[in-house]
Amino acid sequence: MTGPRDIPVEDFRRAGTRVIDWITRYLSRPEEYPVLARVAPNEVRNALPASAPRSGESMDAILDDFEKIVVPGITHWNHPCFFAYFSITGSAPGILGELLSAALNVNGMLWQTSPSATELEEVAVGWLRRLLGLPEELEGVIMDTASVSTLCAIAAARHALSDLEIREQGLAGRPELPRLCLYTSDQAHSSVEKAAITLGLGTASVRKIATDDEFRMDVGELRKAISADKAAGHRPFCVVATVGTTSTTSIDPVPAIAEVCRREDLWLHVDAAYAGSAAAVPEHRAVLAGCGEADSTVVNPHKWLFTPIDCSVLYVREPDILTAAFSLVPEYLRTGVDDEIRNYMDWGVSLGRRFRALKLWMVLRAFGSDGIAERLREHIRLAQNLATRIDEHPDFERLAPTPLSVVCFRACPSALNAHEADATLNRFNEMLLEQLNASGEVYLSHTNLAGRYALRLAIGNLRTTERHVARAWELIQEVSDALVKEAAAR
Ligand SMILES: *Cc1c(COP(=O)(O)O)cnc(C)c1O
């Protein structure tokens, strides 16, 4: 072989074997690493040269540096004591799917540019829809993230206001347009507001509806806000409900919200990025109650369905509205079969599309619906047990209900003599979190709930077992006790 080409296939095989061996070892012992990376800012960058090498280097040299420089700067989402944000797993079948998809390197923009990419996507989103008990008439598309799925859903909702001709005329320089109002709860994910920014609606168009004492959207307040906006001459157009909020995994009353949307003729989008997966567990299927009536729903298999990031599925009731909002087909992208097939480039912003369906299909097949239900059920059981331990302990309290696998709580040691909403407790819990995470043994995150600093422990990794949650709970008590002693000594 002569001329500039890819590295020799024999080198690929050797390096590939080394990579698979490394991954195999890593996945069997992620606990060898501190869960939270211990590098200082810029440490990784400074360990690497400013320019790429003139002449190519061997895969062995590159993989050596991967192990020596890159891995120490990794926060280990695979660690069984990763309890921060939403704990996730890119399972082995998903990793293999990613590998094959990188090898095929197809761009699934058109059906013709790889029929299997499009048709496997249709199959995989159909399997997922049935797994979650969503109605057959919903059509799905895979996007990178829930943020982009929600952006596209809100763009479709805006396009459904056909009299305003926003696709053609835009929003700027049109004083005759009313303000377009978007409703979501004060617990909604920031992606809703970001979508409003991106779509030219502005943050002032986002109405953050108050939540009840369990952090669920107050439907009475929603109705009031819609009436007030209509009375002021504004134009309500979309409600984004959340199934599994980011702070506490609270579940908005979607059936009641759907009823409001039906009466007011508003688009209903449901953000079920994390909690949607719970519907795969028969006894938790009700988490998606009402979503069958929504115009669009997003579920992230990369969150709690063992699929490597990125993989987000957007379901829509009327794909024609979504494609009408986005489809723009230049001559060079026309094919002879456009009437018979689906070109997923028409379903969103990007033209180029990774073959994400492959990993999702592999994960769903490798675990099966029973296997998925069993794994999610175990995560929920572990979280419920921890919630009980916290409730039973006089020096700790839960700060939100625990419907699924995320527990929000704080230490409230009686020895501190702190009052309910005391800043002392907030500072104490902030220190507690900092010390827990510095241990390298566990990684938790936090949130703010009605002015209270809450620790947040999320269970969602396939390697997390009873022992890991027990160790975390033990450590939380130990560190809290030590902090109390320190405070008393001062
Ligand atoms: C994680 C999450 C998101 C954002 O998901 P990305 O895929 O990272 O964009 C949005 N909404 C909710 C409720 C989430 O939990």
Image (tube, rainbow, N blue to C red):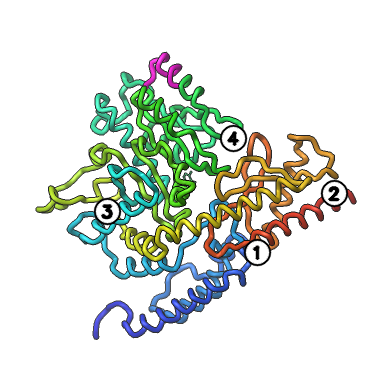
Residue beneath disc 3: 122
Residue beneath disc 1: 467
> Dot 2: few (<14), some (14–19), or many (≥20) neighbours within 10 Å?
few
| Discs 4, 2 touching: Cβ within 8 Å | no
| Discs 4, 3 touching: Cβ within 8 Å | no
Predominant secondary structure, magenta span: helix
Residue beneath disc 4: 214
Q: Is residue 166 left or right of residue 377?
A: left
Mark nearer the N terminus (1 vs 4) = 4
Q: In x, y percent, where is residue 93?
A: 41, 67
| Discs 3, 2 touching: Cβ within 8 Å | no
User: Which amino acid type corresponds to the residue marked 1 in the rendered image?
Assistant: Arg
User: Which amino acid type corresponds to the residue marked 4 in the rendered image?
Assistant: Glu
Mark nearer the N terminus (1 vs 2) = 1
Q: Is residue 89 above or below residue 270?
A: below
> Residue at the front extreme?
283
Mark nearer the N terminus (4 vs 3) = 3
> On residue 487, which mark appears?
2
Task: Kindly identify the residue that appears in the image at 45 percent across and 17 percent down.
Answer: 228
Distance from the alpha carbon under mark 3 to that under mark 2: 59 Å
Q: Secondary structure at mark 3?
A: helix
> Residue at the right extreme?
489
Q: Nearer the viewer, residue 184 or 103?
A: 184
Q: Mark 4 or mark 2, which is nearer to you? A: 4
Mark nearer the N terminus (3 vs 2) = 3
Q: How many marks?
A: 4
Distance from the alpha carbon under mark 1 to that under mark 3: 40 Å
Q: Secondary structure at mark 2?
A: helix
Q: Is residue 232 left or right of residue 454?
A: left
User: Which amino acid type corresponds to the residue marked 2 in the rendered image?
Assistant: Ala
Q: Which residues are magenta?
A: 226-235
